[in-house]
Image: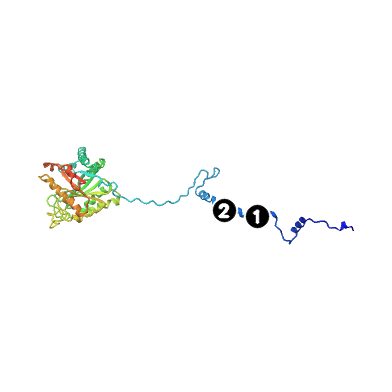
Amino acid sequence: MDQASLEQPEVKQSEVEQTTLLLPGAPQKPAHRNRYLPIGLTLAGILAVLVALVTLPLWQDYLLIDKASPSSPHAGTTHTVSKPGPTPTPIPFDPSVGAVLPTHRVVAFYAVPGAEPTGPAYVVNQAMLDHLKQQGAVYEQLDPAHPVQLGIDLVVSVPDSYPGPDNTYSHHVDDDTLRTYVDFCQRNNLLLFLDLNIGQAPVMKEVSSFLPYLEQYPFVHMAIDPEWMFPRHDGIPGTNLSNVRSSDLNPIIDAVAALPQKYHIPRKILIIHQYRGDGESASNPYDAGEAEIADKRNLHSSPLVDMVIHVDSVGGFPGDKEEKKQQYNEWVGNDMQHYHNFRYGGFKIFYKIEAKTGIMPTKDVLALNPPPMVITYGN
């Protein structure tokens, strides 16, 4: 055998490596193409996290509002998920809104319906209204800072000198007549004061009979005249002098003060007429001969009612103007400062009775201290 036949064929290194990879149980050597696989997977994971962070707000918006594509069954439909908003803070009721006082001055005509001697409002017609407007314009011209609100002070609980069927020495104005005045005032933008004289009738029963008008109509207010009140059945209207106590008047004040909050209506005016002095300096304040209101200092005060002490004294005699001014100074000016339970003064003038000595000029009325915010005219 020659040397050539004895030589083994040359095996290439690459073939050996390939053979080794195929042998079972031989250690596997990774191929060069898998060397970068872990790096690629890591980069892909990082990229996925970044994409998720960027697109998360968009997905949240999509969940709230689905803007469907034209081919979607929801195309053109917007689905909104409402979020509960903050509970609005309720606006507290303010009884001053729409109240007459203190921004306006009231000028009113007084009367018992059908009784001409009592005042110019005994009948409601255009002539009466024109007269009232003329009178109010004089006050507004002198004090334009307080526009005049016109009104009627109407006696609806009328005192009698006889007991009547209910033994109350008083009677009510009939419903039709009262309705005529209510409608007239409503049409002509007038205030209407329901004036209670009461006689011997139970005080709060009388008040309760007329409160529904105050509840229903913002322009209706109330007045009380102690001169004609005999809650202890100790006198006859027009015959005897009266004497009332704060305990007689306070339930009225409280009832009127309760209306604004209960019915959400503007604050009411309550006129308390005063014809004679109170019992502050009297030896016996409960003696009708010495005082009309025994304990005026004990009258209730409330920010929910505009209480007016209204001087009702009658002139028509020499020196009447000075006397009425002095009474106003005492019963309104001084008592307002001493008692602190009312804020406004009122003043009454009688066209016919006081014509004998001359009607007090408007400028003199406004010169009273404090200037009266309610002024009424009788005959």
What colour scheme has been applied to the protein in the rendered image? Answer: rainbow
33 vs 87, nearest the viewer: 33
138 vs 278, nearest the viewer: 138
Q: Farthest residue to the right: give it.
A: 1
Residue labelled with disc 2: 49
The quarter of the picture where the N terminus appears is bottom right
Q: Judge the density around disc 1: few (<14), some (14-19), many (≥20) Cα neighbours within 10 Å.
A: few
344 vs 171, nearest the viewer: 344
Q: How many marks?
A: 2
Pinpoint residue 228: horizontal percent, then vertical percent. Answer: 16, 50
Q: Farthest residue to the left: give it.
A: 318
| 5 sits to left or right of 50 | right
Pinpoint residue 123: horizontal percent, then vertical percent. Answer: 19, 41
- Answer yes or no: is residue 297 visible: yes
Name the mark on residue 3.
none
Residue labelled with disc 1: 37
Pinpoint residue 320: horizontal percent, then vertical percent. Answer: 12, 46
